[in-house]
Amino acid sequence: LGWQLLLDTVEQFHKEHRGMVYYWWEPHPLHIKFPSQTFILPENSQECSERHATDPALSGVNCQTAAQPLIKVFPRPLISREPDLYHLWSSFTTSFSIQMDMMALEGPTMGGPGNMTVEQAACEWLRNTSVIWEPWLKIEPPKEEASLKSGDAKIVKVVIWSFSLLIVFLLLLGAAVLFLWSRNTRLVKRLDLSQGTFALIP
């Protein structure tokens, strides 16, 4: 079918209140726009992967694709020079539910049911979830400038807050780029995401 034709088919079946089984990945706003239930397949194994074939009609794979967790990196020399930034990056975390909450705000262009751009969705999430990201901020004056003025401290806080916004924006942008890229990618191509088979709920 190809990605776009598959999306169109899921949307058509949803409008007609018909059920269907389709292959996709998560987190993705498609499952918010068209409520679906995940098929629980056998866990990924070497034996199962070896049965993979490019032609779906010949492939014997019937297991889940292994999820690929995100990995954070930070320059070691900056740990002591930029402790506030290091604290932010070390504390920053995300989850499946957090990503789905943000994706739910995105508009149709990004594949979501909402009406916001990626930037607007990131800002809205930050406004409503300060209890999550405020602990990531640790503003301390440098040892050699212990008498840092309050006005300068506010500037530093704004800079770090902006960095938090950038992180959230990059996550959403990555999801958006992946969504747009997938339109021109064949269905049989494997993705390094948590993939699975879903049943559209009529």
Image: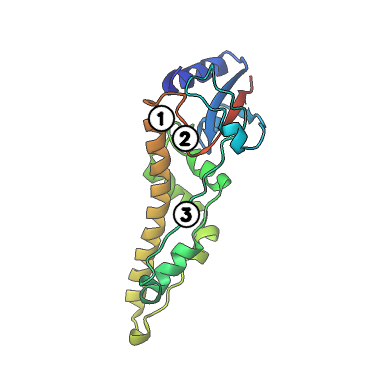
The disc placed on residue 174 is none
If you read the primary sequence from the N terminus, does the residue marked by circle 3 or circle 1 appear first?
A: 3
Rounded to the nearest angstrom, the CA distance separating label 1 from label 2 is: 10 Å
Q: What is the three-letter code of the residue carrying label 1? A: Ser
- The residue depicted at 33 percent of the width and 81 percent of the height is 149
Picture coordinates of residue 129, whole percent (x, y): 52, 54
- Is disc 2 placed on a helix, strand or loop? loop
- The residue depicted at 37 percent of the width and 59 percent of the height is 163
Picture coordinates of residue 79, whole percent (x, y): 40, 72
Rounded to the nearest angstrom, the CA distance separating label 3 from label 2 is: 17 Å
Rounded to the nearest angstrom, the CA distance separating label 3 from label 1 is: 23 Å
Along the viewing direction, whichever of 187 and 18 lies nearer the viewer: 187
For the C terminus, the image quarter is top right
Q: What is the three-letter code of the residue carrying label 2? A: Leu
Instruction: Name the residue carrying label 3.
Output: 71
In the image, is residue 3 above or below residue 121?
above
Instruction: Name the residue carrying label 1.
Output: 182
Instruction: Name the residue carrying label 2.
Output: 191
Q: What is the three-letter code of the residue carrying label 3? A: Ile
- The residue depicted at 43 percent of the width and 51 percent of the height is 168
Question: How many numbered circles are shown?
Answer: 3
In the image, is residue 198 above or below residue 128?
above
Along the viewing direction, whichever of 63 and 131 lies nearer the viewer: 63
Residues at circles 1 and 2 in contact by the CB criterion of under 8 Å: yes
